[in-house]
Amino acid sequence: MSLSRTAFALLGLVALAGPARAESEVNLYTTREPGLIRPLLDAFTKASGVKVNTVFVDKGLTERVAAEGARSAADVVMTVDIGNLLELVDRDLAQPVRSATLEAAIPASLRDPEGRWFALSTRARVAYADPDLRDLAGLTYEDLADPKWKGKICLRAGQHPYNTALISAYLVKHGEAKTEAWLRGVKDNLARKAGGGDRDVARDIVADLCDIGLGNSYYVGLMRSGRGGPEQKKWGEGIQVVLPTFQGGGTHVNVSGAVVAKTAPNRDNAVKLLEYLASDDAQALYAKADYEYPVKPGVAADPLLTALGPLKVDTTPLVEIARNRKAASLLVDKVGFDR
């Protein structure tokens, strides 16, 4: 366990002792890697004087908040994937927030109409490909089931939230029968068993194990910037990146976001933290620190992402995608995608 993870785990033990109430503190529970969000939290503390006590929870975040109940120390719960945000809402673990600042900064499509969740950054599901491949400019997600890719595709597990969300979007657009057929087609085209991570897709393309795959856009920045080390930099620079779209649509995106916990002991500071994370300064830091696309209009993405080309975001509502996650997961099992 790294030092940062150890420190976060110890904070988690402190949180179990009961709610922490202080004029100058706020308690953040998050699945986000400490190193990715620390620059934002440090900047918030510097700007506001409010200390952020952070509890890193790798898995089971919702279950933990639910189990702690009214004695939970959580003020803000931050996670990735719209489905995880809606799960917090559906389990009555989030409270509504009315903030003119948040409503002005975050487009309506990226926040709950009742103020129970807010997206703070977005990431696109892009294609990683062999640099020698040509004519990929019009690539669609539907194309991945084309037999011409047989034995040439690498993907992480279909049950991973990043892929489940994409499959959910496919369901919304095409219905169950066509989505099942598409999944079977993609499975038939796999060069290896679905698994590993997005960066492993890039690694395997560089190693000539496959020609094409899918990965999140922010991994491109992490790899090409060298932040993942020289080996990952080699992977990032050894692939071409394409922004695929749905037929007649745009590129699939998912979000990272946050809610104010229902029993937040430091509610005012929780709202202050969310408002800061939606500010110009914090959105610029998201772009620089995490290589994610800012949600606030007018804030530029990092040059490593803008170099990929203009992002045309698909308009399928995030809430509809989230509501189809279970159906998508069942289809993944039905076709044996991960076996």
Image (cartoon, rainbow, N blue to C red):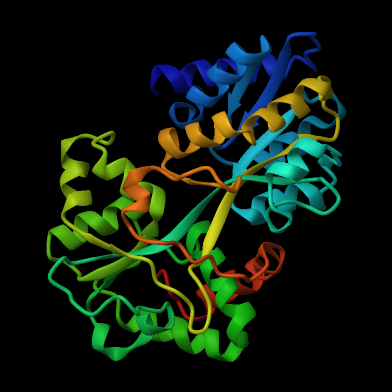
Position of 228 relative to 182 (above/below): above
Q: Nearer the viewer, residue 35 or 192?
A: 35
- Of all residues, the one furthest to the front in this rendering is 298
Q: Is residue 197 visible?
A: no
Q: Position of residue 178 (x, y in %)?
A: 54, 90
Q: Position of residue 303 (x, y in %)?
A: 34, 45
Which residue lies at the image location 16% right of the left edge and 55% below the top edge? 238
Q: Quadrant of the C terminus?
A: bottom left
Position of 142 relative to 119 (above/below): below
Quadrant position of residue 155: bottom left
Q: Say whether residue 68 is left or right of residue 251.
A: right
Q: Nearer the viewer, residue 304 or 329?
A: 304
Q: Quadrant of the N terminus?
A: top left
Q: Position of residue 323 (x, y in %)?
A: 71, 67
Q: Say whether residue 38 is left or right of residue 304.
A: right
Q: Say whether residue 199 is left or right of residue 178.
A: left
